[in-house]
C-alpha cells in the first residue's frame, strides 16, 4: 500500500471518529464536545488505524 493511501485512510478514520465522538458527547451530556477532546479522540483513532495498517502489511507481504 502506498503512503498516500495510508494517509487518506488515516485522515478519514480521524474525521469519522471525531464526528462520532462529538455526536455521542452531545447525546450524553447535552452540550457540544470541546474541540481538544474531539482532537484527542481522532488522534487516538489515527494511531490505532496506522498501526493496524502496518500490522496487516507485515502479515501479508
Image (cartoon, rainbow, N blue to C red):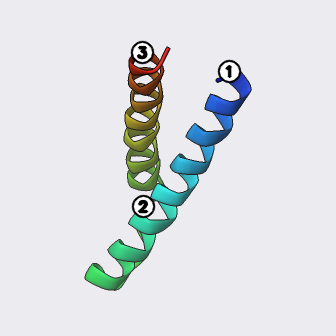
Q: What x and y, as percent, mark residue 7?
A: 65, 31
**How dense is the environment of label 2, judged by Cα within 10 Å: few (below 14), some, or many (20 and up)?**
few
**How dense is the environment of label 3, judged by Cα within 10 Å: few (below 14), some, or many (20 and up)?**
few
Q: What x and y, as percent, mark residue 4?
A: 73, 27
Asked which secondary structure carries label 2, the reply is loop
Residue that numbered label 3 is attached to: 58
What is the residue that sits farthest to the front in this orientation?
60
Q: Is residue 38 above or below residue 57?
A: below
Q: Are marks 1 and 2 in contact (CB under 8 Å)?
A: no
Q: Which residue is pictured at 44% across the width and 55% down the height?
A: 38
Q: Which mark is residue 3?
A: 1
Q: Which residue is pictured at 28% across the width and 80% down the height?
A: 29
Q: Who is closer to the viewer here, 32 or 10? A: 10
**Residue at mark 1 to residue at mark 3: CA–CA distance:** 15 Å
Residue that numbered label 2 is attached to: 34
Q: Which mark is residue 40?
A: none
Q: What x and y, as percent, mark residue 43?
A: 44, 39
Q: Earlier in the sequence, mark 1 or mark 2?
A: 1
Amino acid at each position: 500500500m502506498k503512503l498516500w493511501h495510508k494517509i487518506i485512510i488515516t485522515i478519514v478514520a480521524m474525521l469519522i471518529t471525531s464526528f462520532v465522538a462529538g455526536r455521542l458527547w452531545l447525546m450524553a451530556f447535552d452540550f457540544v464536545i470541546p474541540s481538544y477532546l474531539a482532537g484527542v479522540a481522532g488522534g487516538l483513532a489515527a494511531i490505532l488505524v496506522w498501526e493496524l495498517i502496518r500490522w496487516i502489511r507485515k502479515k501479508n507481504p
